[in-house]
Amino acid sequence: MENSKKIDVNNIDQVRNSLNDKSLKVCVVGIGRIGLPTALSFAKAGLQTIGMDINEKLVNSINQGNFPLKDEPGYEDIFNNVIKNGNFSATTNINEAVSKSNLILLSLPTPMNKKNIPDYSALESVCKQLSDILQPNSLIVVESTIEPGFIESTLINILEKTKRLHVGKNFTIGVCPENANPGEIFHDFTNLPRLVGSIDKETTKIIAMIYDFVFSVELIIMPDCKTANAVKLTTNVFRDVNIAFVNELSLMFDKLGIDTLKVLDAAKRKYNFQIHYPGAGVGGPCLPINSYQFLNTATRTDSKLSIIEQSREINEKMPDHVINLTLDCFKKCNKSIKGSNILILGISYKADVKDVQLSPAEIIINKLKDLGASIRIYDPYYKNSEVFGINIESNMNDAITKADASIIITAHKEFQEINPQIFTKMNTPILIDSRGVIDTSSIKNTNLVFRGIGRGI
């Protein structure tokens, strides 16, 4: 990417012209699960784009033409094309990337620490660097998921700290929170609406113009950054809360002999019911963290979010419920869990995605180890690798036949297509299904000792 053309990205006419002649230069800081597809989308639109990341191995692999997100259909061909035509490259050098760019997109992780407090250190660190190196008249768009008010109260102060930059005068900033589901990012980027907010109406118009040029989806104009970020958190926390609601009902339905899946299948026929499913826990880089972001905001503003607090407690106890179901099965078989061989089927936090961030599988595995069980893992996305200190099995059928018990933790497609009869070949036919994968009618005449979350057994 050559040095950036002198474009005032605060000027809507200059931005329009730079899109038309494709002279706008783009830097995406953070090219992981969301950042890389974002960068590829801008490059596909004909804008020269550079991806910056501190992960040297990732950057080298990308520049060698290796697409890292094999579980994101729709992007590998785009990746190959934009690498070939020179519209996209990657670097670990933020100075180089920013100096050549007019538009800076921040797609950085916002995890939480061990005390469940959001960690914005990656964003803050990058903005400290930008305060020294950002080109005058540049535009920063934050796509990372952050608390409402964080732009206004923290990031702008960091960017202005060196007195070189002044928001609204020689640079501007806004947000367009990413709105995509891992494993379905191409579909979501090309179909779902995006939120746009900024420090002023003119910047919002400019961001909307750019994103309309690249994505051609509905753009929802928000009054400011904090409102846009509040919407993003609200949509995700809504899911976390409703999963907790269904999880809690499932615990009661078990005692009543009611199959939760049958309840949900009937309930979803009502026009205003949005279905959520029970499970072993809620993982990933979004839902748990988003709830704690809102809870952090509540602490900061002396507010109370009791429903979110209780939902987190419920969802975080679900791994314990899986352990209790497992112990119940071993008790019924008059067999000790200590020294037994337990197979974990699926370690990803989400079906058909290669990602173990905050996966309940890790918690369940550690609890089983504490009980003296020997653990094996099969996950089609991690074959022949090591995760959680355990070598992943390469053949599911062989792993099942060698096990004393199997626990389905992730509803990968491969598991949904499995013939439940194979589980009868285990040394002790114990099967725990935490994701509603198994049709209970298919195991009625078998010797399987079966338990599932909310399956009424």
Image (cartoon, helix red, strand yellow):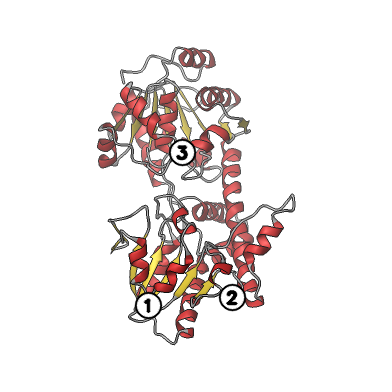
Q: Residues within 10 Å of mark 1 (few under 14, many from 20)?
A: some
At a point 42% along the width and 18% down the height, the residue shown is: 24
Query: Mark 1 — residue?
Result: 427
Q: Position of residue 343 (x, y in %)?
A: 38, 69
Q: Residues within 10 Å of mark 2 (few under 14, many from 20)?
A: some
Vertical relation: 198 (above or below) 271:
above
Say which amino acid is labelled 2. Ile
Query: Mark 2 — residue?
Result: 457
Query: Mark 3 — residue?
Result: 155
Vertical relation: 440 (above or below) 117:
below
C-alpha gap between disc 3 and disc 2: 52 Å
At a point 49% along the width and 81% down the height, the residue shown is: 328
Q: Secondary structure at mark 2?
A: loop
**Do the CB atoms of the residues marked 3 and 1 lie less than 8 Å apart?**
no
Q: Secondary structure at mark 3?
A: helix
Q: Which mark is residue 178?
A: none
